[in-house]
Amino acid sequence: AKLMQGFYIKELGPYARVRGTTIMPVYWAAAIVYLLLPLGIVLFALPRVNLEHLVASSLAWGALFGLVVYGVYDMTNMSTLERWPVRMVWIDICWGCFLCGVTTCFAALVSKWLQ
């Protein structure tokens, strides 16, 4: 994500695919990630949202989904890669909770509006 790009470049150093000051992702892999995350939200977070407490419930379930997805990614890297930054693990997991929580809330509000 462009918003976190500077942080990732600083923390990942030699692991990052960087050209100049820009992260250069493998686009087909990034496309798959950006298809799987919303699919996971639709299949695992949205069905659990309590319609009577739509905003709080969708934020909570989305954040929990983000915790699981980003937590698995970051902890796998932490356990298998040499010098994986601990600081990045916690910030990235928090970012995943925030991003998935807000996305789930937005999806729940749009879904309610469309009904």
Image (cartoon, rainbow, N blue to C red):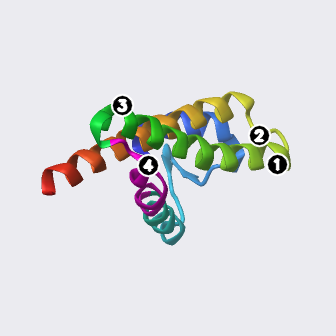
Q: Residue 2, labelled with which disc?
A: none
> Mark 3 or mark 1, which has the lower sequence index?
3
Disc 1 marks which residue?
Answer: 81
Disc 4 marks which residue?
Answer: 48
SS label for mark 4: helix
Q: Residue 84, labelled with which disc?
A: 2
How far apart, in angstroms, are the residues tagged by discs 1 and 4? 35 Å
How far apart, in angstroms, are the residues tagged by discs 2 and 3? 33 Å
Instruction: Residue lying at the far front in this picture: please name it.
Output: 52
Residue name at image x 55 percent, y 32 percent: 94
> Hey, which quadrant is residue 82 in on the image?
top right
Dominant SS of magenta comes to helix
How far apart, in angstroms, are the residues tagged by discs 3 and 4? 12 Å
Disc 3 marks which residue?
Answer: 56
SS label for mark 3: helix
Q: Relative to 48, is 9 on the left or the right?
A: right
Q: Which marked residue is nearer to the observer: mark 3 or mark 4?
A: 4
SS label for mark 2: loop
Indicate the amino acid at tag 3: Ala
97 in relation to 79, above or below: above
Residue 36 placed where, x, y %? 49, 64
Residue name at image x 49 percent, y 43 percent: 21
Q: What stretch of residues is rendered in magenta?
A: 38-50
